[in-house]
Image (cartoon, coloured by chain):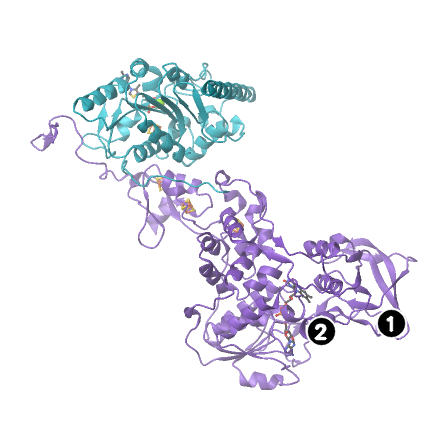
Chain colours: A cyan, B purple
Amino acid sequence: MSQMKFEIPKIELMKSGHVACPGCGASMAMRYALKALGQNTMIVIPACCWAIIDGPSPCSVNGVPVFHTAFETAAITATGIKAGLSRQGDNDTTVMAWAGDGGTFDIGLQALSGAAERNEDIIYVCYDNEAYMNTGIQRSSATPWGAWTTTTPTKTPKSRPKKNIIDILLAHHIPYVATASVAYPDDFIRKMKKAKSIRGMKFIQILSPCPPGWKSAPEQSVHISRLAVNSKVFPLYEVEDGYRYKISLNHKNIPVEEYLKHQGRFKHLSKEQIKQIQVDTDTKWEVLMKKVEMGELFSEN
Amino acid sequence: MKKNALDFKEGMPVSAMSITDMSKNKTGSWRYMRPYYQNKTAPCIKGCPTGEKIPDYFDKVKAGKFEEAWHIILEDNPLPGVCGRVCYHPCEGACNRKDLDSPIAINNMERFVADQNMANGYPKHFHVEKTEMKIAIIGSGPAGLSAAYQLARKGHAVTIYESLAQPGGMLQMGIPKYRLPREVLKKEIKDIQTLGVKIKTKCTVGKDISWQNLQMSYDAVLIATGAIKSRPLNIPGEEKKGIAPGLQFLREFNLDDKKEIKRKVVVVGGGNTAIDCARSAVRLGADVTIVYRRSHKEMPAVPEEIEEAEAEGVKINYLTNPVEFIGDSRVRKIRLIRMELGEPDDDGRRRSVEVQGSEFEIEADQVMLAIGEIPALDFLPDSINAQWGRVDVDSFQMTNNRGVFACGDSANGPIGTVVDAIATGKNSAFTIDAFLNDKSYHFINNNNVVGFDKINLDYFHKEERPAEARSDQTKLTNNFSEVNLGLDKDQAKNEAERCFSCGYCTTCDTCLVFCPDVAITHSDNGAPYTINYDYCKGCGICVYECPRDAMAFEEEIKWKTE
Ligand SMILES: Cc1cc2nc3c(=O)[nH]c(=O)nc-3n(C[C@H](O)[C@H](O)[C@H](O)COP(=O)(O)OP(=O)(O)OC[C@H]3O[C@@H](n4cnc5c(N)ncnc54)[C@H](O)[C@@H]3O)c2cc1C
Ligand SMILES: Cc1ncc(C[n+]2csc(CCOP(=O)(O)OP(=O)(O)O)c2C)c(N)n1
Ligand code: SF4
Ligand code: SF4
Ligand code: SF4
Ligand code: SF4
Ligand SMILES: [Mg+2]
């Protein structure tokens, strides 16, 4: 087949009228997530852009119940709702915590770790736009090395690498962990459906372009996401039971520069710095490949 | 029922709870750029002189609707079975896909569609109410046939006058059967006749019927007499027995099955006529040499055909030119001179210059001259202007004589190929129709062509074009079975899928899938999609992602002022 085709469920639970910026990846991500999970879903949203995108009380753009909660409490609130439903005899409703990177990598990490360690039966999705966007683009531990944010200005851009949240989750030995991209909605939807079918804790990180925060053109959100994947800056893979790795698609060999150049937040980077990012990216990819191999080794036994 | 916090107090829920969606929030007001659907012109359509709607019929092929695909081609070209075999396919030279891997096998696709419809006739709606108008067409080559077809589809009464016993022009008399089986030609001519087109064969204008008579009896006359006269070499000995125009050999063989072929045949010339003569003679058992005065690179024949000829045993003497034919009453030998390439001439090909003192002789029992064909216009009155031996026409294909039109190889303008003849024939038909109805006429201007840079390569993977099947040609003698066999169904469908479909929406859903604002829906008003401008924020993702540039993006202000 020489052309890309989509197999996407027709159902639209997320409706028009939301207040995300034009070209917001987080809004696309929610649309696909709900297509995958269907009507019988409850969402928990902590403080983040999505708390706003959804609409002001008494409105909600999502055609399923949404519970707004405090910044650090997405995982524990979802846990509570799931427990409450189960107490009422409802074990079918999917409860999804939906949080930004700030609410996941940083302030919400202890609640997330607790839920993961207890293997709570929830899906936790982190839409990762790599900074605190809703409050004006402050750095988070998900912000990549070298990126501009309002708290890491171009003179002193972020000097620490992006935290590897997937490895943190994997350390909890939970049944399902995956990365996803808005450029590959079919892959994301497949992963969400799989997550729904698994009992216990599921974690999905979806890279979520943010035109104002990344200083990128709104029309390029999908294109940039695709470059993130194919430059291997944000590879797509899933891990079952903590060790069985599976790469989701054939990653093309695109230089990281292709990915970086469309985003104003990387504009100040020198050739050397870009080279450094390339080296880091290649190393991380190789490490990932080794993990895939090791996973295969263990699976055989 | 579960007990929920749904008890309302004074119309409001007791806890902060949503009671409605966000539909009141018309985010369309944020938009300053407006996306909209706009089909554009694929370069192949512009590259095809008749302007076949290539991606349009490919869409039908994908769906297995081969008859509908045929109908789409027929709008522009009544001879797809012929063109799908013999057209030099300028469409493929223009195809965007060549910049990724290899051009779409458009020519093969056209043939495939025609072959699928060999048992089918025209649909009902091709037969329209008759008008009072009568048109005479001289010549039943592709130009005349195409014009007759288009005129008949407008309801006019068309009579074609043809010298030869069988219609088709060069398709009948020139092109060998191993390239164009005559069932295909016959079928497509028969289809045209079902529209009421009359073809009077064995009727030469200027001999069997006079020009004046013709002009008086018809509302318009179209000259489509082609270029049927062979150019002479003008060298000593040319009158000897055994020397004749190659076209004459082809005509006698193709029409009357006359196979007078000697052992050693020399063909002079480097065009397609030369190659066709050579390959036909080889099939009749001759030892064939082509003599051409320039090098391989300058040879006007299609490269694949030169290759095929050589594979079949035809020898080619490049950079040689005859200076004299030697023999008693019959030709026995040819004196040749070596040539070298000099400065480029007017049409950019390098001039060939004789190398003094380099003459040599080769044996020849039979010589075919194929150095070019020119129109025979002696039947025309002097009052009709000609230029460089061709009827002079304006951009509407009309001569200086109102009501008299000309097309194909007999007129000036694009000449020398079947598809140009079909195109100018079609254009003449439209302008004749406008002339007869006293209307003005505008040709469709295929602007807004989609460039390769507008194709979103994220959606396409490299994949080479299919190789056409070929018949077994190991036993060549007396084998005039078709050499190329075209594509099978799977290959054709796959090739339709491989096409980018430049500027032509394939309802791939990409725009709909990626809209972050759920503003695009499948529409029920005939168009495949509707953009809900109440909510579209104008992010542009749909336009940017469209794999084939079937959308456009414009400043909102333009729409506001309109
Ligand atoms: C051997 C050969 C091979 C070719 N191969 C190809 C090919 O593979 N692909 C391609 O694209 N092109 C090819 N060409 C060129 C192509 O055939 C011509 O460009 C095309 O046929 C021109 O079409 P036409 O309708 O103008 O004229 P023609 O096809 O030449 O038809 C003119 C018709 O008018 C008739 N006629 C002439 N004078 C009179 C008269 N006074 N009264 C009545 N009837 C008359 C003739 O008998 C003839 O039937 C080839 C040409 C030759 C000679
Ligand atoms: C305890 C607490 N601290 C700070 C805030 C302010 N606040 C609201 S949203 C937000 C940023 C959220 O960032 P992230 O989780 O990455 O989501 P994004 O806005 O980027 O979508 C902050 C700091 C808060 N609501 N609560
Ligand atoms: S700031 Fe970024 S993440 Fe937040 S709504 Fe806008 S585009 Fe989306
Ligand atoms: S890719 Fe298809 S539509 Fe585009 S130029 Fe080639 S044949 Fe035509
Ligand atoms: S993707 Fe949607 S919101 Fe963006 S321009 Fe297209 S229709 Fe409008
Ligand atoms: S993205 Fe697909 S469906 Fe949308 S306009 Fe382009 S071709 Fe048509
Ligand atoms: Mg964030």
Q: Where is residue B443 in the image (x, y as percent from the top left)?
A: 50, 64
The quadrant where residue B304 appears: bottom right
Q: Which of A233 and A123 is in front in this view?
A: A123
Q: Is mark 1 within 8 Å of ligand 1?
A: no
Q: Which of B236 and B57 is in front in this view?
A: B57
Q: In this view, does A196 lie above or below B397?
A: above
Q: Where is residue A221 in the image (x, y as percent from the top left)?
A: 41, 33
Kind of residue sitting beneath label 1 = Gly
Q: Quadrant of ligand 2?
A: top left
Q: Say which mark, if any, is on residue B252.
A: 2
| Discs 1, 2: same chain | yes
Which residue matches tag 1? B237
- Crowd band around label 1 with a 10 angstrom C-alpha radius: few (<14), some (14–19), many (20+): some
Kind of residue sitting beneath label 2 = Glu
Left or right side of A154 for A121? left
Q: What element carries label 1?
A: loop
Q: What element carries label 2?
A: helix
Q: Position of residue B253 (x, y in %)?
A: 71, 71
Q: Is residue A50 above or below residue B427?
A: above
Q: Nearer the viewer, residue B516 or B326?
A: B326
Chain under callout 1: B
- Crowd band around label 2 with a 10 angstrom C-alpha radius: few (<14), some (14–19), many (20+): some
Q: In this view, does A209 lie above or below B114?
A: above
Q: Where is residue B461 in the image (x, y as percent from the top left)?
A: 52, 40
Left or right side of B268 for B424? left
